[in-house]
């Protein structure tokens, strides 16, 4: 029964996400896909996955322990902080912090986590901003 509740919750979340994506105002400088293209794809994948979970639940689901749920909650908090800090710190710094934290929580050592965060952030910045020319949030350092 818990899988069905989880599936219905995910479906409602996907519907809310799609509605929010459709309410994004389109700028005259937007790309061919538009600002709501990627969020709509995420909403569709979440919706389809949730429907499968609700229709075909696991016979004996095993939920994570309390400690593991706390880890998941911390990851969600990190992603909310990332969204809030993105316009303040800019893409490169906010992404480096988020990627480093998530890498650390997935088991990397502190130095490897920092290197992963910085490498991921700079790599994504180079690909999306410098190669593809997409606009990313600028931070206090101008990038």
Image: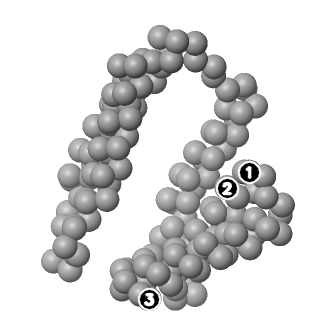
Q: Is residue 3 visible?
A: yes
| Residue that label 2 marks | 102
Secondary element type, mark 2: helix
For numbered disc 1, what is the local secondary structure? helix
Q: Is residue 140 above or below residue 54?
A: below
| Residue, disc 3 | 130
Q: Residue at left 37%, top 27%?
A: 52
Viewer-closest of 97 and 103? 103
Which color scheme is applied? Answer: one colour
Q: Residue at x 72, y 26 (%)?
A: 66
Q: Is residue 66 above or below residue 84?
A: above
Q: Which quadrant of the structure image shows residue 97? A: bottom right
- Label 1 vs label 2: CA separation? 5 Å
The local secondary structure at tag 3 comes to helix
Question: Could you say where residue 126 lies in the image, as x and y percent from the top left?
Answer: 50, 84
Image coordinates of residue 59 in percent, x first then y, are: 52, 12
């Amino acid at each position: 029964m818990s899988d069905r509740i989880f599936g219905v919750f995910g479906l409602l979340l996907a519907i809310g996400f799609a509605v929010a994506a459709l309410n994004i105002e389109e700028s005259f400088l937007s790309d061919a896909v538009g600002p709501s293209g990627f969020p709509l794809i995420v909403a569709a994948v979440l919706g389809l996955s949730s429907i499968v979970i609700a229709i075909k639940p696991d016979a004996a689901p095993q939920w994570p322990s309390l400690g593991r749920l706390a880890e998941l909650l911390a990851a969600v908090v990190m992603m909310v902080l990332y969204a809030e800090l993105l316009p303040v710190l800019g893409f490169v710094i906010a992404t480096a912090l988020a990627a480093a934290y998530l890498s650390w929580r997935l088991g990397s050592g502190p130095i490897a986590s920092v290197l992963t965060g910085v490498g991921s952030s700079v790599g994504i910045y180079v690909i999306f901003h410098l190669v593809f020319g997409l606009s990313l949030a600028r931070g206090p350092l101008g990038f």
